[in-house]
Structures are given as C-alpha cells and as structure tokens.
C-alpha cells in the first residue's frame, strides 16, 4: 500500500510540475474565477492579525497571499508537491512586497512541522488529489493547535460543473478511456455531499460544517475555453494524446459547439459548484 501511495504522490508531483507553466499563464483568469472559494475559506478560518496559517496544496499562492494581508503580525506557510507551482507563488509574493509569506515543497501526508504549529489550516481543491485523504487530515490535525480550524474546498457534482464536463464528455465520446479505480484521485472524487464531512468526523474533528458555494466562469470566447482546458487540465491532455488529428479536430468542434451555446454574445459561460468544509481541532 505504501508503495502505491508513493507512486501516486510522485505521479502527482510530476504532473503539476509539467503543467505549472500553463497555470502561470492562466493565473489571473483562474484566481478571479475561484476567488469566492478562497474568500470563504479565509472567513471560515477566523484569522486574526497574529495567526500562523498553513495553506495546503497552495499551488500558485491563493488563498495564502490574500490571507497574508490579514495576518499582518503573523505568517502564511504555503505547501505543495510541485516546486514549479510554488515558484509562481513566491514570485507573486516578492512582486507584491509580501514578506510574511513562505513556501515549502512537501507531501501533505508527511509534513515537516512540529505538532501544534499552526493557528489555522486551509486547503483549496487539494483533497481530490491526495493519495490518502485520511492521512492528509490526520497530518493537518497534528500540526494544528487545539481549537484551530481546518477549512477545505472540493469540487461539487459533475453535473454542476460543466466547465469541466463539457470537454471531458466530448473526449469520452470519441476516445475509449479506462474507468478510474474506486477512490482514485480525480476532480470529482470528493464531490458527494457529506463525503468530506464524514472524513473530517473520522479524523476526530469537531463542529463540522459542510456547505455549497457556486458561481459562473466566463471565457472571452469558446476558443479561449478550449485553449485553457488543453493547457492546464492533465486529463484533457491525456485524452487528446490518444487521438489522431481528425479525431482531435472532431472533439474540438464538439467542444466549441457546446461552448457557443452557453452565451449569446460570443463568450463562453459555465457554471461551477464547490463544497466547503470546516472543522475544529
């Protein structure tokens, strides 16, 4: 089992490093899109100016960079598997003159921090990809102080996230994709209502609350949506890699057609839905 978890972890690190340039390119669009989720995590964390916040799977820096503006006498530590993603976060902090912000490459399942190090923990869209969700929560609990809040967000149901399913459905219609193993890391692994709340309960956290937050993401055109998804989404790239040029063109045409139907003004608009979970140490 440990070997299998290590293989998943290593594959995840390689994937996020590979796609970090795409995430850097599209950073402004992505962060504007999911800013409401980060804002909700920060509110739920109940930060004060002297907090030391741990942001897990922090990628290109949010919500940690926003939190650093609140914890003016404290500090934000952002961890991620990917050095490439963390380099983007560190560059942004330096450019903005944010000095109470640090990055650390590590695995959530074996964090290099002492027990009770942090006043709060946030994790936006990380749990879906952890090799072991329970181990990740156990570690978050270990490094948290008594009474600390552990706040996370995961994507909601596929049917409520057409920004992802539009392109993946088009690929599935043309490419035979092997079914994912039960519990395998993936975008909608944690989507079922109560799934994460149950994991929090199993970890021994208290006062657990799970809510839904939703919104809309807008792309300048269907073509921009296609370009975005083919530059940041590993499953999309993996699926397209199995096609020849005519099949890829057919998939692209289907995606563009579907995206055109989302808006009457030439843009592409998609709904999104996430589940936000909070518990106390």
Image: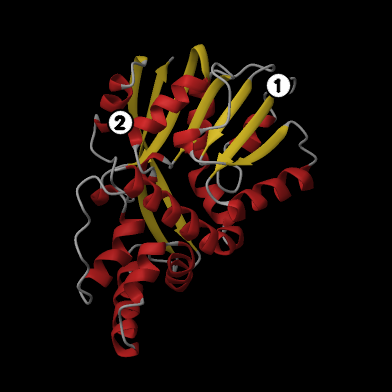
Q: Specify whether 35 is left or right of 208.
A: right
Query: Residue 163 location in percent, x, y?
Result: 36, 57
Query: Residue 173 location in percent, x, y?
Result: 20, 73
Vertical comparison of 249 with 180: above or below: below
Q: Secondary structure at mark 1?
A: loop
**Residue 96: quadrant of the picture:** top right
Q: Specify whether 274 is left or right of 14.
A: left
The C terminus, quarter of image: top left
Tag of residue 196 = 2
Q: Secondary structure at mark 2?
A: helix
**Residue 212: quadrant of the picture:** top left
Vertical comparison of 100 with 263: above or below: above
Query: 179 or 132: nearer the eye?
Result: 132
Query: 217 or 68: nearer the eye?
Result: 68
Q: What residue is drawn where x is 70% and y is 34%?
A: 101
Query: Residue 218 location in percent, x, y?
Result: 46, 57
Q: Residue furthest right?
A: 97
The N terminus, quarter of image: top left
Label 1, label 2: how many angstroms apart (C-alpha)? 29 Å
Q: Is residue 79 visible?
A: yes
């Amino acid at each position: 089992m440990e070997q299998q978890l290590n293989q998943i972890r290593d594959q995840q690190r390689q994937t996020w490093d590979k796609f970090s340039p795409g995430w850097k390119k599209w950073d402004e669009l992505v962060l504007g899109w999911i800013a409401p989720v980060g804002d909700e995590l920060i509110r739920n964390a109940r930060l004060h100016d002297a907090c030391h916040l741990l942001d897990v799977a922090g990628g290109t820096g949010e919500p940690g960079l926003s939190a650093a503006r609140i914890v003016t006498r404290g500090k934000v530590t952002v961890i991620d598997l990917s050095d490439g993603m963390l380099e983007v976060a560190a560059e942004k902090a330096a450019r903005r003159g944010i000095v109470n912000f640090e990055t650390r490459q590590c695995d959530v399942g074996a964090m290099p921090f002492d027990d009770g190090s942090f006043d709060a923990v946030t994790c936006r869209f990380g749990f879906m990809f952890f090799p072991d969700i329970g181990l990740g929560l156990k570690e978050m609990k270990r490094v948290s102080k008594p009474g600390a809040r552990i706040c996370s967000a995961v994507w909601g149901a596929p049917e409520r996230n057409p920004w992802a399913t539009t392109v993946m459905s088009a690929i599935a219609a043309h490419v035979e994709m092997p079914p994912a193993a039960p519990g395998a890391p993936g975008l909608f692994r944690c989507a079922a209502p109560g799934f994460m709340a149950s994991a929090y309960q199993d970890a021994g956290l208290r006062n657990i609350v799970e809510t839904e937050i939703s919104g809309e993401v807008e792309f300048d055109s269907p073509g921009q949506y296609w370009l975005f998804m083919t530059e940041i989404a590993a499953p999309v790239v993996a699926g397209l890699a199995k096609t020849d040029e005519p099949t890829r063109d057919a998939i692209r045409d289907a995606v563009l057609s579907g995206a055109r139907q989302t808006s009457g003004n030439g843009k592409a608009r998609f709904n999104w839905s996430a589940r936000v979970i909070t518990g106390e140490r």
